[in-house]
Image (spheres, rainbow, N blue to C red):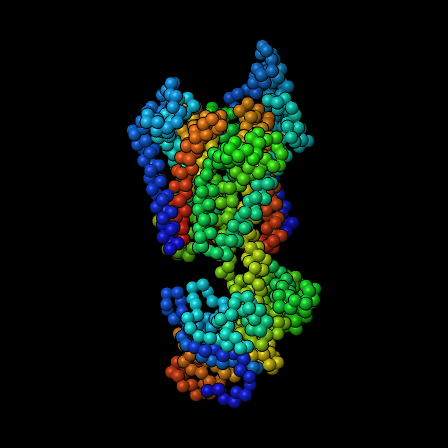
Amino acid sequence: MKKYLFGKVVILSAVLIIVTVISFILTNISSVDPAEAYVIAHSQIPTEEQIQEVRVEMGLNLPIHQQYFNWLRKAINLDFGTSLRTGNEIVDDIKITLMPTFILVLISMILIIIATISLGMLCAQYPNSIFDHLVRVFNILGMSVPTFWFGYLLLYVFAVKFRFIPVISRGEIESAFLPALTLSVPLIAFNVRLLRSNLLDNVNEDYVLYARARGLAEWRIMTKHVLKNSLAPMITIFAQTFAYLMAGTAIIESVFSWPGMGAYIIKSITARDFPVITVYVLIVAIVFVCSNLLADLINIWMNPKVLNCSGGQNDW
Amino acid sequence: MIGKIKSFEAYMGGIIAVMAVLVMLFGPAVSPNDPMEIHFASEALGPSHEFPLGVDNLGRCELSRILHGARYTIGVAVIALTITIFIAVLYGFVSGYFGGGVDLLMTGLCDIAMAFPPLVIIFSLIGIFDVCLGTLLFSVVIASWPWNAKIIRSQVLIQKNRDYIMAARICGTSHLKIITKHIFPNVLNTIIVMYFTGVSGMILMISGFSYLGIGFDHDLPEWGVMLCEAKAYIYTRPELLLIPGACIFLTSIAFNLIGESLRDGSK
Amino acid sequence: MEVNRVDKKIMEVKQLSVKMKDERFLIKNLNFNLYKGGVTAIIGLSGCGKSLTCKSILGLLDKNCFVSKGEIIYKQKNLMAISNKEMSKIRGNDIGIIMQNPMTAFDPLTKIGRQMSETLMAHNKKMNKKQAIRVSIEMIRKMKVENPEAVVNSYPFSLSGGMLQRIMIALTILLEPELIIADEITTAIDASSRKMVLNELHKMKRNGISLLYITHSFDEVVHIADYVLVMKEGVIVERGDVDDVMTRPKHVYTKALIDSKLIGQDF
C-alpha cells in the first residue's frame, strides 16, 4: 500500500512540476513585455530607463530557467509576488478570492451528489417509467445547455422578475444558490446517467440475488450494497468534478458577480497579469492533483482489491 | 413503447440538426436583411414586418444575425472538432495499440494536458499570440484532445485484447492491417458517437469563449458574441439574450440527441 | 411413487409452469412434494430448468420470465400469491439456499462478517451486531475454517471458492431453516471442499432439515438423496426413490443419462 501511494505521489509531483514549468514558459514568452506594461500603467511618462529598472526588479533580465527557479523558491514559501493589476501581494488576493469560489464549489458538489444519488436511485427503482424518461430528457437538456446563458436566464427570472435574490452579490451564502445551481445542472445530468447505468448493472448481479435469497430487505440491499457498488467507480469522477469546478467557475462568477477566484482570474487575464496567471495555473494543478490522490485513497479504502489488481494486456 | 420514444428522440434530434445545418449553409441566402447593417431610426424594437425578430441594441436585424451566425458557431465548432478527433484517433491508436513504454509516456502527456483547464490554456495562449480565431481554435483543440484520446485508447485496448486479434497476429498479419481492417471498424462506432456529442460540446465551449470576448470580432453575428453584447441589456431587452442562447441550446440538444441514440443503438 | 411417506409433507409444488416473455415454456407442469427430513434431488443437463425451479420457489425469477400457472403450497400459503415483503421473511429463515457460485454470491465491497451479521439480524430482531458476529465466527469454525476471526474481517475477493461455500453453508445453518435448497453447490469448488460440503449436508439431513438438492451428478444423488426427479427441457420425465431409479430406470432419457455417464462426476 505504501509503495503504491509513494509511486502515485511521485508521479503527481512530477505532473505538478511539469505543469508549472509549462505555464511559466507560456506566460513568459508572450508578446507583451510585463515590465513595459507595468511602467506604462504606473507612470505618466514611461522611459526606457524606468522600463529597464523595472525589468531588473522583476528579474526579467535573468535567463529563463533562473527566473523559474527563483519563482519556484519563492512559491514554496508562499511568496507569489505582486499582482501587476491590483498591486497587492498575490497571496493576499488569493486568500480573499479563494474562499468564495470554494464555497460555491462546495455547495455545487453537495447539490450534485444529493441530486445524482436521489435521481439515480429513483430511476433504477422504476426503470423505463415516465419518471425515468423525464430524467433522460433532463439529461440531454442538462448536457446541452450553455451554462452562461442558463445562468442569465435564472438571474433574469429570479432576480429581475421575481426579485427573490439580489442581482449583485457580495458573497453571501444565500446568493450562492443560483450560481451553484447553474454550475451543477450539466454535471448532475452527466452523473445521473452514469449512476443509473451502474445501478442497473449491479441489480442484475449474483450478489443481489443471493442477498434477496437470504431474506434481506429490498431497501437495505439497494442502499447498503447496490448503491455502494455503483458509487465506487464514480468516486474518481466526483473528484474530477470537484477539480473541474474549482477551475471552471470563471464564467458563472462573472454572470452572477460572485467575488471569487474565477472572476479575479478573468480580470487578471484581460490585464495580462502574468504573475497571477502562473499562480492560478499552479493552484488549479494542485487542486487537480490532490483531488485525484484523494479519490485514489477513497477507492482503496472502499475496495482494497484495487491494490491487488494487475492489468493483463497483450503487448507486442 | 419505450423503443418508439427513443427513436422519436433520434428523429427530433435529426430534424433539428438538419435544420441547423440548413441554416448554416443557406441562412445567409434567406436572411431578410444585412446582418451588419445598422438601422438607426427603428422605433419598433420588437418584431415587425421588416425585422421578424426585431433589432438588437445597435439596430441590426436580429433574425439576419442569427441566420448568418450559424456559420460561425456551428462551422467553427465542426472544424475544431474534426481536428481534435483526428489527433485523438491517431494518439489513441498509437498509444493503445503499441502499449508499453510508448503508452505510458503518451498517457502521461495526456494527464498533464488534462491538468490544464481549458480557460487557462486559452488565456495563456492569448498572451503569446493574439486574441484571434486561430488562437481560439488552437486552444480549444489542445484543451479537448486528451479526453477524446483517452476514450479512443481504451476502446482500442478493449479490441486489442480480443481473441480474434491474437489470432490475426498469429497468422502473421501486419500491424497496419490489423489496425485498419480489424480494430478501426470496431472503434468507428465510438468515433461517430464522439463526433456527434462532441459537436455539442464544442459549440458550447466556443460560444462560451466568444461570450467572454475571445476569438471573434465583436461585430460578427456569432451566437456567443451576440450573447456577450446582449448581457448589458438584460433588463431592457432580455430577448436579445434569449434568442441566441436558445439557438445554441437547440443546436446542442439536436446533436446530443443524435449522438445519444447512436450510442444506445450500438449497445 | 412415494413409498412409505409417513413423514410430514412440507411443500407441495402443483402444476408449476414458467414462461419467458415471448411465450416460450421454460418449465411445464411440475408436480412434486417435499417432506420433512427428506432429501429430494433434481437431476438433469444444463438448461433443463433445475435452477429455475429453485428460483420460482423463492420468488426470485428474472425479469424476463414469469410463472404462468401453478401453486407452491408452503405452511398453508401459496407462495405464488404472497407479497414480496412476506416472502423475504420466509427466504433464509424458513427456506434457505446455497448458491452455485460462491465467488460472486457476496457483495465484493462489504466484509463477510458484516454480510453474515446483517442477515442474522434481519431475521432475529433481538440479536445485536456483536452477538451476530460471535455466533458467525463459531459456526465458521465448525466448518473447519482456520482463523475465523480473520475470515470474518475479510472481503470476499481474498477468500477461496471453497471457503466462501463453507461460509454460505454456515450462514444457512445459522438461520435454521426448515428446507434448504442446494443449487449445484459442488460444481464450482475443489474436491476436498466438495467432500466437506456433502458431509455437512448429511449432518443437516440427520438433524431433520429437508433438502432440495440440484445436481448434474448421479454419484452425488446416490450419495445423498432419497428421492430423485429427472428433468429434461423443463419437464419431469422420471421420478422415484433413488434406488429404484438408479437400478431400474424406466424412461429412455434416464437410462441414457445413467449409461453414458454424460453427467457423472467423481468425488
**Labels in figure, total:** 0
The x, y position of residue C166, in whole percent, is 60, 70
Task: Establish if A138 lies above or below B211.
Answer: below
The x, y position of residue A147, in whole percent, is 49, 36
The x, y position of residue C133, in whole percent, is 67, 65
Q: Nearer the viewer, residue C65 or B46?
A: B46
Q: Nearer the viewer, residue A303 or B159?
A: A303
Q: Nearer the viewer, residue A238 or B251?
A: B251
Evaluate whether residue B116 shows in this view: no
Residue A171, image quadrant: top right
Residue occupying image coordinates x 64% and y 19%:
A57
Residue A80, image quadrant: top right
User: Most extreme residue toward the bottom, as rendered?
Assistant: C4
Task: Establish if A53 lies above or below A122.
Answer: above
Residue occupying image coordinates x 45% and y 63%:
C63
Residue occupying image coordinates x 57% and y 44%:
A111
Lateral position of residue C97 relative to residue B1, left or right: right
Residue B24, image quadrant: top left
Lateral position of residue B154 relative to residue C117, left or right: left
The x, y position of residue C176, in whole percent, is 62, 74
Evaluate whether residue A40 shows in this view: yes
Q: Nearer the viewer, residue C168 or A165?
A: A165
Residue occupying image coordinates x 55% and y 58%:
A222
Lateral position of residue B222 relative to residue B120, left or right: left
Task: Establish if C168 lies above or below A21.
Answer: below
